[in-house]
Image (spheres, grey):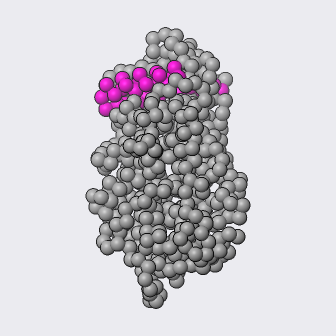
Amino acid sequence: MLRAVLLALLLVLAGCQAPGFPGSPGADSGTEPGDRPTTTDSASSADSTGNDRIPTGGEVPEDPESDRLGWENGYWHNESVAVTPGDGYNESELDAVVARSMARMELVRGLEFEEDVPVTVIDRTEYRNESGGNHSEALTRFDNAKFEALFLVGERDDSIETQESTRGESVLGYYSPSRDEIVVVSESETPRLDGEGTLAHELVHALQDQHFDLAADPVRTRDAHQGRNGLIEGDASFAERRYQSHCGEAWECLGDTENGDDEGGGEGSEDAGEQSDGAPGHLGIQVLMYFPYSDGPGFVESLYDDGGWDAVNDAYEDRPDGSPEVIYPDRYPEWEPADVELRDRSSDQWERVEPPNRPNYAVPGQSAIAATLAYTLADEYNDAAVVRPTDVINYRANGSVDSRDPFDYDVGAAAGWAGGKMYVYENDAGELGYVWRTKWESPDEAREFASSWTAVVKHWGGERVGDNVWEIRDSQFADAVRIRQRGDTVTVVNAPDRDGLSEVHDA
């Protein structure tokens, strides 16, 4: 029953990721900006520029002599556009919709577009065909071990393919900094825009790139990516919500049921019914991927409340260093990940896997640990979950899920994470192992993590066979695992069998 609830929740919350970014699914840095969770809650109608409210309706002014906020390519933010979406948009219709949405978003976000943003609408089949990437064998092995270490993808499966498949079921659109273009993914056989939410969200990414250079200071680890994208996706989601709050009040928007045919023909507002009809893919990976969209908006709202859009803009000069700063906005910008020493203590039969063009270690942080714990609620292996639903899902008082912030990454066993490193090892037989050391803010928090991670191992069939050693024999994670706490650190070692543990890491 719970799995069905989570399945329905993730269909409602389906966000998107973009293909082809240097931090591809196999790289710890994740994917390029591009997502938009659909929600039906109304944002505050107070003007998001920090001054007066967005101007309502009224007479449309003459075109200005020079560019200005709220006007783009011949369209004011409050103009009507004549479109017939039933058969898809022709080029002139799409240009009009995009120009008006640009005018609206720059008024909401308080930033002027410096150049036009090409927009293409494709169907989901075309997106799936285009979104796959080629990855080196070393990167594939490294990523497989990392996701096996997190108990998210078993050793019989390809972790990169699993991530790409999961993303392909839920992506709504993306902005590509390398191509300076937006792609919107449509569910209809005739690709079309059913509303303005996805377009508005991706336009924020275009503004970010034009003003703050999204390719600057690239991140190379999973948790650094989660921190960086907490700002980028949180900004886009927060601005999109404020954009949509003006629909039906200050603006006529595509899909508004009260609008006439020129505004979408009464197609209905965008909600859960406009999402992908397919399964959301891997539930644990969805929770991991969704972090920037669940906690990012709250982080950005905290910045905005303190200093308006100027404070949000300033954050691009000092982007969050990891997921804890996004989960706990009061730690920004002082928090930094602790340096963790993890010397190579493997035997001659094992050596570290060296993925190309990235560090030779991974950094799964608090958001990744929380996703692993949450996955024990929804996997199909057994019913012995490590956490309760209320530990990882944000419920409202009436029992419904908070669609704006659905997942709680402040899970007891993950809270207090201060830093870490994971190295992947391979022997001559092609078998994989890993050593993962995490540092915690106190010995008590390290102890809590060690206890909970032991419960995760037992959840997947682990049986104790020695001091701090477990063997998993009958699940997709069949291996030996050693978990050892010393003070404020916890070291997890994995090998194909018990005897191999000291070969991978002689402690």
Residue 236 image point, x, y percent: 45, 59
Point 55% across, 73% down: residue: 259
Residue 170 image point, x, y percent: 60, 50
Magenta span contains residue 222: no
Q: Is residue 456 above or below residue 51?
A: above
Point 48% across, 56% down: residue: 40
Toward the viewer: 503 or 1?
Answer: 1
Magenta span contains residue 451: yes
Left or right of 475, for residue 441: left
Q: The magenta stretch spans which residues?
A: 430-459
Left or right of 140, for residue 37: left
Residue 193 image point, x, y percent: 61, 66
Toward the viewer: 172 or 161?
Answer: 172
Q: Is residue 477 above or below residue 152?
A: above
Residue 387 image point, x, y percent: 45, 29
Dividing the picture into quarters, in which one does residue 92 lie?
bottom right
Residue 151 seen in the figure? yes
Toward the viewer: 362 or 273?
Answer: 273
Residue 417 seen in the figure? no
Q: Is residue 16 above or below residue 191?
A: above
Q: Quadrant of the C terminus?
A: top left
Number of numbered discs overlaid on the protein picture: 0
Q: Is residue 270 above or below residue 67?
A: above
Q: Residue furthest left?
A: 306
